[in-house]
Amino acid sequence: MTNHYDNIPSSSTQPGYKKTKLGWLPVEWEVNELANISTIQKGIAKGRKIKPGTKTSLVPYMRVANVQDGYLDLEVVKEIEVPTDEVPKYLLRKGDILLTEGGDADKLGRGTIWMNEIENCIHQNHIFAVRTNKEKLLPNILAEFTRSWQGRKYFMLSSKQSTNLASINSTQLKKLPVPLPPLPEQQKIATILSTWDRAIALTRQLLQEKEAQKKGLMQRLLTGKVRVKGFEGEWDALELGQLFSLSSGKTKPNNTRSSSTKNINKPVYGGNGIMGYTDKSLLSGGKILIGRVGEYCGCVHVANGDYWVTDNCLFTKEFYHSTSINFLAYFLDFKQLKRFRNKGGQPLISQKSILKLKFPIPQIKEQTAIAAILTQADEEIRLLREKERALQTQKKGLMQRLLTGKVRVNP
C-alpha cells in the first residue's frame, strides 16, 4: 500500500494555499456546491397507492438498511411493486452516490457508490442518488468526501436532530460545499484510496465467511449432528431450570457514563451488552446475562470480573448442574430465546418461560470441548474485525490529508 506523494503542510502562511469555505486548500483547487456539479434524485416511497388497472412491475428496492458507511449490505434486498412507466425515473445507474436522508447521527450521509450490483434496481425515498458531472467531480471523490471530517461536520451542523437520530433534506444536500482538485489529481487520489478499499473489502469478505463457518459449526455441534472426536452416547434432555436459577438486575446507577475512566470503569450491562460504566459493582465472576425486556429481550452475553446488571437483564444466579458457562451461552444464543417472549405489548421474556424450556444437553467434558471450538472461531472473527477497523482508520487518516490538500499527489 505504499504510494509516492509530496507532503505539503496546509496553513495560512504556506505559499500555494488559499482560504475557502472548507479551510485552507491548494490554490489550484475549487470549491463548489453539490447542486452545481451533480444531479440529485430522490427515490420512491414504499406503500404509495397505485391506481387500479395500472400496469406495474416488481423491482429490487434499495432501503436505508442496505446503505452502510462506505459499502452496501445486500444480504436482504426487498422488492416493491411500482407503475411500470415510473421505473426508468428511479433506476439507479452505475456510479451513483447513495446518501441516506436520515438515521444514526454519526452515520448520516453514508456516501456509498452504486456499481450496478443488481440490475433494474430503484431506491427508497429516504435515499438520495447523486449523479456527478464526471468532467468536474469523480464519484469516488464525492463518496470519500461525504465520509471525511468536513463532510461529517456539514451534515451534523445542517441536519435536524432528535436524540441520536438526524435527517437532512435535498435543499441542505444541494448546498454541500465540495473540494474540486484538478481532474488528474482526483484520479490519482481515487486510485490511492481504492488500494485501501480493496483491502477492506477482502477483509470484510473473510469476516463474513468466518461468521458463516461459525454459524454452521453451531448448527452441527449444538444439535449433536456432528460430535466432537472421542465423544458418543445420548445427550440428556434437561429443563434449563435444572441447570441454573435466574434473577433480575437493578436500576442503572445514576453516575453511569458512556465511556470508562480511571475510577469509573465497571461495565454496566443492559439487554444488549455493555451500555456504560460506573464505579459500583452489583455482581462479580462469570455469569450468563439474558436480555429481559424491550427490543433486545432474549439476547445472551457472558460477563466476568466486577460489573453491574440493570433490570432490563436476567442473570444466572446459581448453577445446579456441572455446566460450562461458555457452552451454555453459545447454546442459549443458538436457541434464539427471543422466540419465547410474550405475544403482544412490549417484548418481554420471563424467568419462568426460560427455565421451563427443555433441550438435550451433553455432559460437561463434551460441553467444554464444543465451547473451545466455538471460542476459537470467535477469536478468528475478533482478529478480522480488528484488522478491518485498523484498515478503516488508516484509510480515514490518509483520506483526510488527501482531500484537504495537506498531502499532494503527483498525477
Image: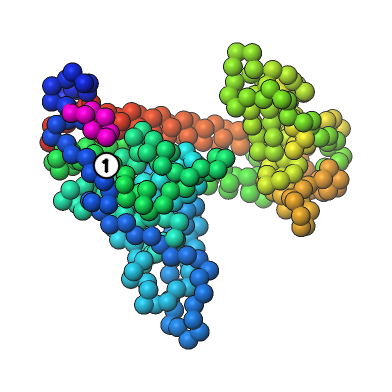
* Magenta stretch contains residue 21: yes
Q: Disc 1 residue type?
A: Val
Residue 291 horizontal/vertical position (percent): 72, 40
Residue 342 horizontal/vertical position (percent): 79, 53
Residue 398 horizontal/vertical position (percent): 29, 29
Using the image as rendered, state which of residue 270 and residue 126 is in the foreground.
126
Describe the element under mark 1 as helix, strand or loop: strand
What residue lies at 17% left-to-right and 20% top-to-bottom? 14
Residue at the spot of label 1: 178
Whether residue 150 is visible here, answered yes or no, is yes
Residue 63 horizontal/vertical position (percent): 47, 57
Magenta-colored segment: predominant secondary structure: strand
Determine the residue located farthest toward the bottom in the rendered image: 53
In the rendered structure, the answer to whether residue 288 lies left or right of residue 167 reads: right
What residue lies at 83% left-to-right and 48% top-to-bottom? 353
The magenta region covers 18-24
Mark 1, other Cα within 10 Å: few <14 / some 14–19 / many ≥20: many
State the quadrant of the C terminus. top left
